[in-house]
Image (tube, coloured by chain):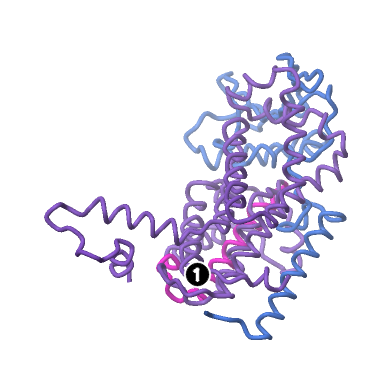
Chain colours: A purple, B blue
């Protein structure tokens, strides 16, 4: 168990993952969940602080507070992209984003698409210095990515747990998807909905997939990547039918992927594509080695 | 190879186990109040195969008689947030003034409102499939003071 939890990964992997996570924070502010900022205009009477906000005695959001957090978080997340001061900037991003999410979810509606992403922001500062292209294996990096993976799988598995708790086994033969489609369905979803058995079949499939999701940890690496591809395809279908993106969760799911290899491959392809006939690679020098030199 | 010290390992094991335990405890006994922990209950409700689907909205009549929808773009309030306060609006329609205020702040040059309403559209569902029929019901109406 300990070996599994601390299985080392190249530090470069977590460096790429960290950059993508901090880039997403900035994008989330302005592209994915811009409605959080709209709460600056909401009547304070609509504010229903979450348990964590009450325990920490967080202030009732005001236009000033919301604007300060928005701009501070945008600046800090972009600064964190540089990979400098990873602990200081990382903790600052986590604290500000967590408060931003507490504000987001304290007006009567709570979303569950970002548990694993919050885990990622919480553990990434513990890795410390890590640079793109750094191939040295690290247990710190391995643990950080492992707990993000646990967060991803827990989101699925405990979603099925919640379905059994609130809806019971009848959830599978109920009308939850019909309801979702009527409220926010796309043309594709409205085309699928009348097909006899389609929605009930989908509900049974969702329950089975969510309950079985922890099995991903028992798969060999090759099949694990295929399972992750299936996870992504599941979200592609939910976006295409009921317009639910789960964007932060999708970013957290990158923790399963050998990102450093994808980067090396991309660099290698870019280098070979950019190489002109007048400047061929020196004989005997592998393309990958050349790429590594230019990347340092 | 960067290895962890025994203390570093122990701290991380405790943090991991605590987090997992909190997830299972809140999944079993918790509520939305325990965000960011579980229960992860989006679309987890009990919806029988023939239960109509509620599709609430806030709409308004402007002073020149037009009916407009006050959605998230107009008020900054998400539909689910409005829906969570459905009972409160029905019991006390004057609470709709908060929605009108949010609209006014975001649309200072927009048309003035004469009345704000909480309307519940119920889409008919049979055997877990939509039938295409629906009914509208006004649960709360608040005349905007001139």
User: Alpha-carbon neighbours of circle 1 within 10 Å: few (<14), some, or many (≥20)?
Assistant: many
At 66% from the left and 31% from the top, the residue drawn is B144
Lateral position of residue A89 relative to residue A275, left or right: right
At 74% from the left and 53% from the top, the residue drawn is A48
Residue B141 visible? The answer is no
Q: Which residues are magenta?
A: A79-108
Lateral position of residue A169 relative to residue A269, left or right: right
**Badge 1 element:** strand
Residue corresponding to mark 1:
A10
Q: Position of residue B44 (x, y in %)?
A: 78, 40
Residue A87 highlighted magenta (yes or no): yes
Q: Position of residue B2 (x, y in %)?
A: 54, 80
Q: Position of residue B127 (x, y in %)?
A: 81, 19
Position of the C terminus of chain A, as image quadrant, is: bottom left
The chain identifier of the residue carrying mark 1 reads A
At 53% from the left and 70% from the top, the residue drawn is A90
Q: Is residue A280 above or below residue A56?
A: above
């Amino acid at each position: 168990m300990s070996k599994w939890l601390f299985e080392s990964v190249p530090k470069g992997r977590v460096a790429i993952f960290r950059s993508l996570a901090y880039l997403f924070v900035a994008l989330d502010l302005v592209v994915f969940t811009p409605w959080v900022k709209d709460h600056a205009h909401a009547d304070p009477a609509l504010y229903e602080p979450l348990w964590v906000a009450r325990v920490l005695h967080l202030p009732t959001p005001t236009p000033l507070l919301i604007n300060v957090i928005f701009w501070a978080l945008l600046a800090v997340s972009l600064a964190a992209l540089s990979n400098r001061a990873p602990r200081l900037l990382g903790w600052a991003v986590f604290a500000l984003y967590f408060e931003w999410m507490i504000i987001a979810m304290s007006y009567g509606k709570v979303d569950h698409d970002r548990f694993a992403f919050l885990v990622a922001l919480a553990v990434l500062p513990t890795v410390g210095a890590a640079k793109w292209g750094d191939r040295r294996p690290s247990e710190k990096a391995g643990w950080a990515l492992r707990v993000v993976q646990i967060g991803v799988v827990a989101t699925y598995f405990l979603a099925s747990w919640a379905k059994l708790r609130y809806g019971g086994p009848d959830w599978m033969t109920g009308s939850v998807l019909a309801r979702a489609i009527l409220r926010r369905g796309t043309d594709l979803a409205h085309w699928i909905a009348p097909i006899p058995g389609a929605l009930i079949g989908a509900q049974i499939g969702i329950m089975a997939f969510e309950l079985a999701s922890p099995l991903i940890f028992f798969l060999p690496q090759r099949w694990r990547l295929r399972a992750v591809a299936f996870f992504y395809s599941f979200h592609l279908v939910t976006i295409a039918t009921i317009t639910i993106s789960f964007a932060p969760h999708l970013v957290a799911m990158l923790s399963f992927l050998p990102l450093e290899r994808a980067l090396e491959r991309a660099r290698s392809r870019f280098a070979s594509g950019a190489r002109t006939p007048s400047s061929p690679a020196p004989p005997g020098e592998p393309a990958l080695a050349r790429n590594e030199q230019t990347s340092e | 190879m960067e290895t962890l010290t025994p203390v570093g390992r122990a701290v991380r094991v405790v943090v991991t186990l605590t987090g997992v335990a909190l997830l299972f405890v809140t999944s079993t006994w918790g509520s939305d109040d325990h965000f960011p922990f579980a229960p992860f209950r989006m679309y987890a409700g009990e919806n029988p195969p023939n239960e109509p689907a509620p599709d609430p909205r806030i709409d308004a009549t402007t002073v020149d008689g037009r009916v407009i929808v006050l959605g998230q773009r107009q008020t900054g309030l998400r539909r689910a947030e409005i829906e969570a306060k459905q009972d409160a609006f029905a019991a006390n329609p004057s609470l709709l003034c908060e929605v009108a205020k949010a609209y006014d702040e975001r649309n200072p040059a927009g048309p003035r409102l004469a009345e704000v309403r909480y309307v519940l559209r119920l889409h008919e569902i049979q055997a877990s499939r939509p039938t295409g029929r629906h009914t509208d019901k006004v649960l709360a109406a608040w005349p905007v003071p001139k």
